[in-house]
Structures are given as structure tokens and as C-alpha cells.
Amino acid sequence: MLIERTWKRWVYFYIPLTVFVVGTLFPFYWMLITAIRPDAELYRSWRAATNTPFWTLQPTLEHFRDLMAKTTFPQWLWNTFFIAVASTAISLFCGLLAGYALARLRFPMAGALGTSIFVTYLVPPTLLFIPLANIIRTFQLGDTPWALILTYPTFLIPFCTWLLMGYFKTIPKELEECARIDGATRFGAMLRIIFPIAVPGILSAGIFAFTLSWNEFIYALVFLSSPEKKTVPVGVVSELIRGDIYFWGQLMAGALLGSIPVALVYSFFVEYYVTGLTGSVKG
Amino acid sequence: MNKPIAGGAGSAAGLEVVLPHPRTTQPQRLTRLLENERALAALLLAPAVVILGTFIAYPFIMGVWLSLSSTSVGNAGEFVGVKNFAKAWNDSIFRTAFGNTFFYTFWATLFKLTLGMWLALLLNRHFRGKRIVRASMLLPFIVPTVLSTFAWRWMFDPTFSVLNWLLFRADLITTKLPFLSDGTYGMWCAIVVNTWRGMPFFAITLLAGLQTINPDLHEASSLDGANGWKRFWYVTWPLLKPVTIVVVVFSVIQTFSDFQLIYVLTGGGPANSTHLLATYAYQVGVATGLLGEGAAISLFMLPVLFVVVWLQLRYLRRMEGA
């Protein structure tokens, strides 16, 4: 093993790591402290001698109360949740079937199809939002959750397919062959043998898809217009700023509450999440 | 029907018992169809292909058509050739946005790679609280970009910036820094926020790559007299290269097409000096309603994305061939 002197360990390890941790987490701390600080304290000159920017002596929940009572924030939370769950479900369904077909079945154009699904994964939403808005209008889906439930899968399906395809490839073919010899149909073997084994892969694809749709912004911004139909990111941007006035207390309270669901999902499944993340990159 | 147990011969045997031989012709025909690999593949791929076709391929074609037309909101427009592209190219705001996009992508990716690599090397060591530190490092990547960018915007606030306060207290500045009220500062602020948000992705992915490297290699090279830097450069880096290339490609695509960060942080201002291609396309196409011109501006992203994707595919092919 490589041996290090103590001072070296401090200089090369503890100090840089501390800087990274503080730098990464400070904005979240700042969000929290702003959200519980009374307005009188928020807007005080940066040079004031009595300024105590890093903590507050009069913590208050007033911003959270205003956010819940005076804005449609609870409705935005529900919208975001509903849209994220529905689009994740659609994407998992399509991704499971397509991933299985690409990993296991031989058919003409398999390679080309696999490549084109991979390429759609790399198409950024910002390239297509203007024509998509037109299409949404033609289908009369504008300002409904379906505009997002149907378009989010465009970036979720390629991702799910790619991740699950990699996962299916790691499952030995023999398992399926045994089932088939015992009389299972191809479809039956897929449904009852392969899918149950792939549950960890499905879970990581699902978590990832959920966080991606929770975070999506530009489609939601362009396709939705009624305040009560918006998702959290769009609602916070467009409804909590009135004219040129920023209600920073409410904004930070909203940012905090809007982050908690994804942070919770993530903290419960952190292992799956990391495997999914790294697996998708290596796949 | 028996519940299948994942894997093992037991479940397969169970299936044999519960599957009756179908007598009716209808299910039999369906079963036979599903036994055909091509038919089954077509069936399984259909949902994905329909959705991707309707909401990616079709909009793409429509985007190309829009960019060649004078369409605006409420006006069907007509074919105008490359007029929109020419107009954008001669527009000084567009030129700024175009340059900004490259500047932003280059520096943000460089910082994310360097800092992400450094962080990955730090996290790869053993220390107390390793799990919690690793988990918390991913937070910026998990939390919705728009929401965390608001926290940054508040930190960069012209009047109440905590960063100004810190720098002032540390005697590093005497007057406030114009974080977002100056174009050049604004661009660098956006790069900082983008780096903050994207670095965890680099770190965690590179960490996963680092963990596949056999420690014996390091031991052997240090016995041969290689110091820390040399061990990184001649052992770690070559082995990490494949993972690094994949992460960089993803990051370049995302950064190059970024929208939300600039939209929230500066809104393209002051005086349109911090627009990226995506935010400018939004301003022209959606806020102003000139759909044709907006579509043309966002299509300017295509050549770069195309080159990046092409390089990536070529690299993947070569890896598979090797």
C-alpha cells in the first residue's frame, strides 16, 4: 500500500474534499436559509454591520405558508407528479419491449434500428421545441398534461431502451432456452422469465426517467399556459415573479419543496440510480 | 397460474405444467405469429417506433420545413428558401449567441472534466463517511436545474449578493461585482453554475470507471518509481479514456443545447449579450412568434450535434471491433 505523510493527506485530500463538499452544498444551504428568513432581514444592505447572512435569529415559515395558500403551488406539485409518473410508465413499457427485441431477437435492420434509437437519445429537446409546439397545437393537446406525457417519452424511451437492452444482454440466454424447451412460448418466456430477472434494471431506468421528467423545463414552458396546469419548474419561474419583483423567500421555499420529492426518490434508490447512471454510460 | 420464480429450472418446470395445449385456432394463430422472431420484433418495437416517429422524426422534418418558410403564429407562411438562415447570420445578436454557445460549451466542459476527475480521484479513496459524501455530491445533478439556478441567481443578486458580502468581508473587493448585470461576468457566472451542476455526473461516472482499474497496476508502477502524477498520467488516464469520451460527448451535447440555465440566470440579458442558440431561438420563435426564424436558429445547432454524434458512433464501432 502507498504510505502518505499526515500533512500530505491534509493538503492533497481533506482540504480539497472539504472545498468540494462546501461548494456543492452551499447553494442548498442558501436556499434553506433564505426560505426561513423573514422579509425584513432578507432585504438588508450587503454592507450593513448588523448583517448576519449565514443564519437567522427569527426563523419563520411565513414563506411556505404563503406559497401553499396564496399560489397554486400544491397543484403544480400534483401536476408534475402525475406527468412524471405517466410518462415514466409509458417509457418503461416501450423501453422494456424494444430493449428486449433489440437485445434478443434477430431480424433485418436490427443494427440500424438500434443505432437510430441511440441517435434519438442524443437529440436535445431544444432542437425540436418549435415544430413540436406546432404539432401539439395540431393535435389539440396544447395546455393539457397530455402534451407533456406524450412528448417526454421522446427522450425517456431511448434512454430506457438503451439501459434495459444492456441489462437484458447480461442475462444468460440459457434461462430462456430452458423455458422454451419446457414448452413456454417466446413471448411467455420473455414475460415470465426475463422481465422478473430484469427488475433492478427496470427500477433504475424508472427512477432515472422519473427524475428526468420531474426536471424537464422547455417543453413544459412552451406547451402549457394556464397557471393551474403548470409544472413546478415552470410555475416557479413564471408565477412567483410578478412583473420585475422577485419574491425570494417564496421562490426559495418553492425551490426547496420542488426539489424534495426527487431528492427523496433518489435517496431511497441511490444505489440503483448510480448503477443506472454509470451503466447507461458504459452501455 | 403459478407465479414464476425468477430464474432456475423450477419455474420453467412449473410453466410446463400450467400451459395447456391450446385447441382453439385463434390463440394458436397468435401464438404461432409470436413464435416468429420477425413478427414478434415488429410487435415489440412498434410502440417505441410510433412515439419516436411522431414526436421526433415528424417534428424534425417539420422543423426543416418551418425554417425554410415565413411561418409565424397565426400565419401559415410560404416557402422562402434559406432567407431565415441568411437573416440570422447577418443578425448581430445571433452572432453573439452563436459565439457564446461555443464559449460556454468549451469552458464549462473543460471545468467539469477537470474538477470531476479530481473529485472522482478524491472519492475513490477510503475515508470515514464516504457513502454520505458520495451521495450528497450528486445532489446538484438530481435537483431540477431551474430551481437550483434560482438559488444561484439569488446568490448573484445585484443588491443582496452573499458572494459580494463574502468577498467584501475578505477584503478582496471594495465595490460590488456586477455578476449578472454585465455580459462578460454573466457568461462566466453561467459557466460556473453549469460546472457546479454537471460536475457530479462526471465525478460519479469517472469514479465508476476508476473502480474497475486494478490496484495492482498502481502498486506495480509505484514500485517502478512512478510518482502520483505519473501514475495518473500513464496508468489511470489511458484506462479511463473510453468512459471519459462517452461522458464528454453527453456533456457537450447537453451544454451546447442548454436552455434553462441561461433562461433563469440572465434571460439572455443584459442587452442580449448572454444568449445561447437555444434561448435566442426561444425568444424569436416563441416569445416573438416568428416560428420560421426561430426554427432556423435552433437548426444552427444541428451541424455541431451531428459531428459530435458521428464521432461518438465511430468511436463506439471501433471499440466493438477491437
Image (tube, coloured by chain):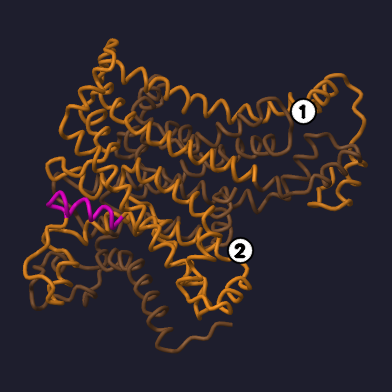
- Report crowding for label 1: few under 14, some 14 to 19, many 20 or more residues within 10 A (C-alpha): some
Q: Position of residue A237 (x, y in %)?
A: 27, 46
**Chain letter for mark 1:** B
| In magenta segment, residue B183 | yes
The stretch in magenta equals B180-193
Q: Earlier in the sequence, mark 2 or mark 1?
A: 1
The residue identified by callout 2 is B212
Q: Main secondary structure of the magenta part?
A: helix
Whether labels 2 and 1 share one chain = yes
Judge by depth and name the residue closer to the eye, A65 or B168: B168
The kind of residue tagged 2 is: Thr
**Chain letter for mark 2:** B
Please give left or right for residue B35 compared with residue B86 in the image: right
Seen at 38% across and 71% down, the residue is A21
The residue identified by callout 1 is B37
| Display colour for chain B | orange
Residue furthest out toward the front: B224
Q: Position of residue A267 (x, y in %)?
A: 50, 63
The kind of residue tagged 1 is: Glu
* Number of marks in picture: 2
Relative to A249, residue A116 above or below: above
Please give left or right for residue B275 compared with residue A151 in the image: left
> Which chain is tinted brown?
A
